[in-house]
Amino acid sequence: MSEQIVELTKDSVAAEPSITANGALSMQAGIGFTLVGTNLYALFQRKDGANTFLVMPTDHEPSGGMTIAEMVDEINNLLNGAAPGSGTLNSEDIQTAASDVADASKKEGSNVQLSEIDWKSIKVCLKQAFLYLTKGQSAEYALSINFDTSVLFPAGQSFFNVSGLTIGIWNTERKKVLERMDLLSVDECLKELE
């Protein structure tokens, strides 16, 4: 078997290939996290020169939420972990602030005391958290929080009673986002009167 040695000369070598970038730098980072007992996902993406930021729930249905006491405990744990000795929230301060609402709803002669309110049963539920930001486009957002405040008001109160409070803000038209918020539109409510 003979070996052939080929001598390469400058003329026999093809031109060196050049490497060119035909696009801008692309990158992505994502993180899963929990807020008010709701699993969320945040995503940052840089693609084609545009930065995009997205926050959305990962569960198909909202979680059961958290009680006020659980929220205060979690916030205190977070604060103490980040800056030990920085002080803590006091769930009694929140309870005292809510007592004015409870007092305003009492029946005449009712002696419901603040200490009788079952604060552990008040639930806060993050139904929707959605944020979509991308360079050159308007931001899209949606936030919906439910407060089950039925325990703040005496059972059987007929003149004025509150079973819950829902706060929602949004500017998106994305169907699935709005469905999760479980909103009633004014138009839908008015159709009930026709």
Image: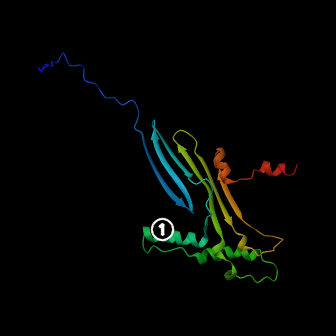
Q: Is residue 118 left or right of residue 137?
A: right
Rendering quarter of residue 152: bottom right
Residue extending farthest to the front is 1
Query: Residue at 56% of width from left, 46% of height from top?
Result: 132
Residue extending farthest to the top is 11
Labels in figure, total: 1
Residue 177's place in the image compared with 11, above or below, is: below
Residue 177's place in the image compared with 22, above or below, is: below
Query: Residue at 50% of width from left, 58% of height from top?
Result: 33
| Nearer-the-camera pick, 29 or 169 | 29
Q: Is residue 122 left or right of residue 2?
A: right
Provide residue 81's location: percent of width, then percent of height. 43, 69
Q: Is residue 160 left or right of residue 180?
A: right
Provide residue 75's location: percent of width, then percent of height. 52, 69
| Residue type, numbered disc 1 | Leu
Residue 127's place in the image compared with 20, above or below, is: below
Query: Residue at 58% of width from left, 42% of height from top?
Result: 138
Provide residue 193's location: percent of width, then percent of height. 87, 51
| Nearer-the-camera pick, 25 or 67 | 67
The chosen color scheme is rainbow
What residue would you read off at disc 1?
78
Camera sees residue 171: no
Camera sees residue 145: yes
Mark 1 nearby-residue class (10 Å; few <14, some 14–19, many ≥20) = few
Residue extending farthest to the right is 194
Q: Name the secondary structure under disc 1.
A: helix
Provide residue 160's location: percent of width, then percent of height. 80, 70
Q: Is residue 153 left or right of residue 61?
A: right
Q: Give the position of the N terminus as an image quadrant.
A: top left
